[in-house]
Image (tube, rainbow, N blue to C red):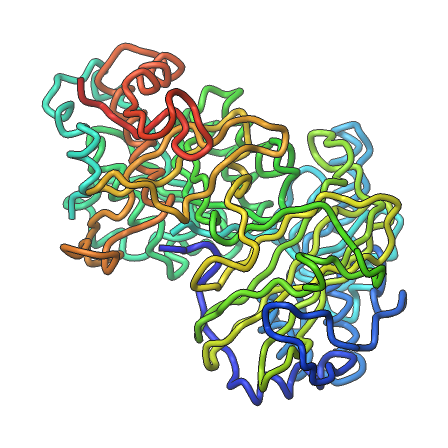
Amino acid sequence: MKLFARKMRIGWLVFAFAAAVLILLPGKAVVQEDTLHKAEVPQINLPTAADKGDPKMDYALNKFLKIFYTEGLDKAKEFARLRQMDLEDDMIRVVVEANPTGYATQTRTLVNIVMDRVRALGGKVETFYEELVQCFVPYTALQTLAASSLVKYVRLPLRPYTMAVTSEGVALTGANLWHSLEPYRNTSGEPKVCILDLGFKNYSALLGTELPSSVTTRSFRANGDISAGQVHGTACAEIVYDMMPDAKFYLVNFNTEVEQHNAVNWLISEGVDVISYSIGWYNSGDGAGNGPITEDVKKAYNNGIVWVGAAGNEAEDHWTATFSDGDNDRWHNFSGIDEILNFYVPSYTLVACWLNWDDWGTWSGTSFSGSRQDYDLWLWIWWGGAWWFVDASENWQTGTQWPVESIGYWYSSASTYWGVSIYNWYTTRNCKLELFTTGNSSAIEYNQPEGSLIVPADSPYGVAVGATDAITDAYHTYSSRGPTHDGRIKPDFCAPSGVSVSGSTYGPRAAAGLAGGFYGTSAATPHMAGAFVLLKGKTPFSLDEIQTILKKRAKDLGPGGMDNQYGIGRLNLKK
């Protein structure tokens, strides 16, 4: 079950949708006679430098302000809903990147000044981490804030996405055979495991049955909501509990990268042994283990924590290639004359596209030096026998910004094809491009499963987990696979998916087919995390030694040894 970024709440009928985007956005596509599958980009007004807006703000914020000032607040709010922006009392949630100094004490002083500046402009500071300030800023103050010499960049927060009864994986892996063993450690030394997730709806109703009678909870969300309306974290916690009931459980949630950074610092202070992390991020790192999210994995590792994370569910939603423009019109040719990669989207779905390329620059431990190769991403909808322009992502890349573009829209009308195009705004070389889509109900056109890992599964300091079927042991074709962008084999293991959980979350797996139950690398990950916690509690071995044991016991389901589908093999605790 594909759970990355697929939580649909609002949308329009196709006619209303098409009309709205033509009002909101510049240009109109002319009807083409090209077929759906071999289409050149329709003739349309291309953007100017002025359309891209302020280089110190991301494109979505620039566009929000343009709509606000030219079409009014209602239209701006409409755009914000489609693009998943958080608005509150004529303010918008952003992350302000302060200009780093290189010295911690000076950086903290600088961040304090930036926070004071936000407050002076009528904004509200929510939290901060190193040079990142998460805050609400009045719409009318965004440009003033970005213009400050103390501010490097103003952007929307990075967002994580979930990869979304006794689990069948317990018996398959043999974890039940360990449950009756006398624990090596006494109660005071029981292992600590954290399910780090986005929400834990209904968890309290399961205490003493599907979950321990007592758990430690903490929300790092700005509003402190441990539930956050999501059962995903609760289902993951159920599986860990099924694998190892004799542990101290932490249920911790967050909503942005700044909040996650603070959560990880707290878990380190609590002495947690294992983190179960069924979450992934797009456009949040270079795919070679560098970036702000993988930095959390490295920090956890350096403090003795095993970070067990989902490989991702994107094997059918991934494409990569070097930019190619055979007809010299600045649009990438996916194949022959085809300049639009298409994918089929059902109704009531979040349509989202994420583009990055190999020009991140140097990772300092806190930021990338940035890109000077500038590509843009365009989104189309197929309607009435033609492609119609919906929106574009046109961030500047002038040497300090990340090499990323993304578009997301809520969609609630009839199922149809959508498409994306890649435009070369300004480059000095042809970069290697990587594209993910979400919302499609089948594999995208020109799909390439290889290298489809989601951040932070690319981290060399974490344990990445792929998905196999809990009953048949078959490989789940959606499961992301390696290699990483620097050539390392990932995932590290695979583990059961398609399992039964309580009715308060996803419910039991059906007797046949994929209906019901909990699927995805989201479900595989807590099985693997639970195995680490189980052996931590039942044996005298260190976590590093436990990982060696698990590797030796893994059931090799693919080519002999490590491979980019199964890793070392499926989790196995039997002799």
Relative to 190, 510 lies left or right: left
What is the number of callouts on the image? 0
Up the image or down, 54 lies above or below 175; here it is below
- For the N terminus, the image quarter is bottom left
> Residue 168 appears at what percent x and percent y?
18, 42
Report the residue at 64% width, 40% height from top.
Answer: 285
Quadrant of the rendered structure where residue 569 is?
A: top left
Could you say which is closer to the camera, residue 393 or residue 114? 393
> Residue 523 appears at what percent x and percent y?
32, 44
Report the residue at 76% width, 29% height from top.
Answer: 105
Relative to 271, 91 lies left or right: right
Report the residue at 27% width, 19% height from top.
Answer: 553
Report the residue at 53% width, 32% height from top.
Answer: 265
Up the image or down, 325 lies above or below 50; here it is above
* Residue 144 shows in the view: no
* Residue 402 shows in the view: yes
> Residue 239 appears at what percent x and percent y?
25, 41
Could you say which is closer to the camera, residue 230 or residue 324? 324
Relative to 347, 338 lies left or right: right
- For the C terminus, the image quarter is top left
> Residue 322 appears at what percent x and percent y?
72, 45
Quadrant of the rendered structure where residue 476 is?
A: top left
